[in-house]
Amino acid sequence: MKFNKAQRNGLATVFDNIGTAVIIGLIIGTFIDSKITLFPAIALSVTGSLAIGIALLLRRKR
């Protein structure tokens, strides 16, 4: 499926917001409440990084 530039930018914005929310949740859960253990922290880090990486990939020049 091909997306136009506006659709790719909108989808990239969604992935930016998801990645940001996951990373903020990781920080709050790990350092403030101390309720997240090692495995969920790693999973959240990977998920947040992946979401932001997809957003960057969608915004690259073609």
Image (spheres, rainbow, N blue to C red):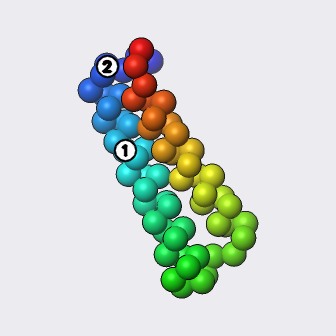
Q: Quadrant of the N terminus?
A: top left
Q: Is residue 51 left or right of residue 40?
A: left
**Which kind of residue does numbered mark 2 sit on?**
Asn
**Image location (x, y in percent) of residue 61:** 40, 19
Q: Which secondary structure, mark 1?
A: helix
**Image location (x, y in percent) of residue 25:** 49, 68
For marks 2 and 1, give the CA distance.
16 Å
| The label number, if any, that marks residue 39 in the structure image | none
Which badge, 2 or 1, comes first in the chain's sequence? 2
Between 11 and 32, the residue placed more toward the observer is 32
The quadrant in which residue 35 appears is bottom right
The quadrant in which residue 42 appears is bottom right
**Which kind of residue does numbered mark 1 sit on?**
Val
**Image location (x, y in percent) of residue 32:** 51, 83
Between 24 and 4, the residue placed more toward the observer is 24
| The label number, if any, that marks residue 4 in the structure image | 2
Say which residue appears at 67% left-offset and 66% top-offset: 40
Near mark 1 (Cα within 10 A), the count class, few <14, some 14-19 or many ≥20, is: some
